[in-house]
Image: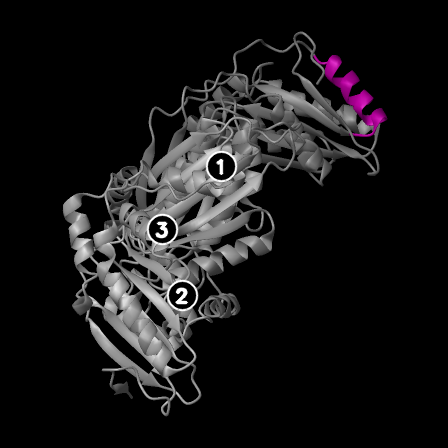
Amino acid sequence: MRTLADRPPLGLLARDGEPGGAIALAVAHDHGLIGSLALAELLRARLRAATTSTVAVRPHALGLDARVLVRTPDEAERAVRALAAALITPAPPRDPANAAAARALAAPTPAAGDPADECSARAGAGRRAPLAPARAAALVEAVRAGAATRATASLAAVGPGALLAAASRARDALAAWPDGAPPLDPWPASDVVLGAPAAGDAAPLTIAIRVRDGARARAAARSLREPGAPLSVRLGALEPAWQVRDAASVVRVRGACLRVDLEPAPDGGAPVTPTDAARAALIATDELEHGLDSEVDEPDDTAAAARDPREAAARAAWQMLVGTRPPGPALRRAIVHRSRAGAAEAARFPAAFDALSRAWGDDALDTRTRAERGHAEVAILLASPCGTARESAADAGASALALRAVASALNGAGSVEAGVLLHPDAVGLQVRAPRRTPREPPAVHALRVADVLGRALLRPIGAPLVDLERSRLLAEHAGVDARAWSATLEALAPGRPSWLEPRGTPATLAALRPAVVDAQRLAFAREPLRVAVMAPTGEAARAAADRLEQWLRSLRDAPEPCPAATAVDPRPGSVRFERPGALPIAYVGVPLAAAGPSARARLEAALAREGLQETARVLGGTRGGAVVLALRAADAGALASAVAAARARLASMPDRWGAESAWAEREGGWAAFGAETRLRRLWAGPAPAPIAPERLARIAGGFALDRHVVVVVEAPDSGQVAGLAAAR
């Protein structure tokens, strides 16, 4: 930029390779769109008479620009003089150019728009009533006189060096211009949420934010337009789905405006309700403000990026007028829903927006964070304390299959290491990733990991991924007899096999359709989720948790509470399955009132002392549990003896529990230092209290012989375990 006392500033952009260049004049004022239209008509009339070059004048709500295409240095000098004279020369009512401008304003002209249009300096869809000739003439001169100052007008030249030198000489030779002050460009006093009937082709939903920093607004608008941008992903996950029509930024005398226009996706389905529009608006506001928080460290290439030299010159001229007033103290939002259902429906939008805003404010994700200085990794565990509470015999293992599929997709992407937490009392996803480079800031690192997890939760699970993870889960069940194992779980927890085994049974896994599995992904997101984040700094950990909450808002308005605790009623007894050629196998189960952490630790320690740790498993959680022994033998007789001995030992186990500590710390050595262990402990919170004696007595009652479940599989001709009838 070249400045000279008593002259308008001149911006110069050297640009080779084109046959010529362009000269532009930019003007900023506070008269709004009608003032720009008036001044534009005056400049058009004067420039048509003063030059044979192609001239274009573009008015907008903040001012205007006029650009001239030039090929030679002489043309550049003439263009500078013509543009300057068109603005600086007074225009009394009898001036032919003023009269021409007044005649143009006597016809209907574009009207100022709604608050979102005002922020982004756009015209509205309506038309303004004609102005009387005398009033139009007075307006033309008032706008011109206020705009013809060094603080409100600027010039720019784009082209090769000789053309720029000629433009500089012409600007320097101009007569002195009046001093002045930049336009006030008032900062909005408050946010605006508006519903209005649709008009023309205006977008059904617009979010415009008045921001302090033009560079951040430009960077945010650019990222919003990128394929696969987070906003597009989040909007596409809504029901009905929405999409981005356009995203743009406008730099102003005071701050800037970031605007995004949204519309329902073509296959969005049902008509859009005010609540649907409010949800899309809140998600877009989330994403716009998240983008504005990002640091920007890049030069402003707005003018150079323009392909047409005239547009480059207009941008360069406008750049010299912006930022000349300090921005306001805070962001201001203008959110407008233009409903095609009429005025009455549109009027419901502000209330719907307010109600949903309050609901989202109450839906703070249960967050537990910890700063781990000296670590170069971010780890996140997002899990539901409902566990498998909602699953029944019809969909047992659905949570496990859905979460395993999401984790598999994450691992396939390669940017994070993903795993699952599968327990009757908690199911979830955990991800971890190191810094990309030693210079990656902790907050950027943490947000990147949160974004990866958030995207994965919003991405539908396809059938191939379901089939892949189903096969892997079935392989994990390969060591059991499917029919007998299912019968054992059904007897111990009727109708709720995944309350004991969160991976379900081979039969239930095989029956789960891909649509059911993907529905479970959505159901998981609506649970009262808790997130644990470990990061190098506390600020980074909190930023990751907040970002993850934003992603979840695309899938839920408020979490659904866990189902009320209900007890299962075990069905003790015995059953025998015949299968030709089968090697004898038996499952002996002991139902438990619960198998929470304290009880589980106590039982596992007791089973180890009995020498049963190789054959016994403690299953379940706080809603109910079981100890199950898997016994194998060479023949039916040996199996019968093993079953009888195991049952006798189980029945007498409570007599040998003694008074040792109820909470047995099972992890030793380096296990307690692992990131996964630390993360899960952070998620779970303080260690549970030691198990109370009365609860221990209830658990002991389940070990009585008459509470046992025995399921045997053997060949038809191998005899049978005493007292068991064959099941068909």
Residue flagged by tag 1: what amino acid is it? Phe
The chief SS type of the magenta part is: helix
Instruction: Give the mark nearest the N terminus, 3 or 2.
Output: 3
Q: Is residue 441 left or right of residue 615?
A: right
Q: Quadrant of the C terminus?
A: bottom left
Circles 1 and 2: CB atoms closer than 8 Å: no
Binning the other alpha carbons within 10 Å of mark 2 as few (below 14), some (14 to 19) or many (20 upward) gives: many
Of labels 1 and 3, the one closer to you? 1
Classify mark 2: helix, strand or loop: helix
Give the amino acid at mark 2: Val
From mark 1 to mark 2, how far is it between C-alphas? 34 Å
Q: What element carries label 3?
A: loop
Q: In this view, does 261 lie to the left or right of 75?
A: left
Image coords of residue 473 (percent x, y): 46, 66
| Depth order, front residue of 333/682 | 682
User: Where is residue 306, by image quadrant?
Assistant: top right
Q: Residue at x 40, y 33 (%)?
A: 369
In reply to whether residue 171 is colored magenta, the answer given is: yes
| Magenta segment boundaries in residue numbering | 159-174
Which residue corresponds to mark 2? 517
**Badge 1 element:** helix
Q: How far, Cα to Cα, is label 1 from label 3?
A: 60 Å
Looking at the rendering, which quadrant does residue 481 occupy?
bottom left
Magenta stretch encompasses residue 667: no
Q: Name the residue under label 1.
A: 673
Residue 198, labelled with which disc? 3
Horizontal side, residue 472 vs residue 500: left or right = right
Residue 433 in the image: state x and y as whole percent.
56, 41
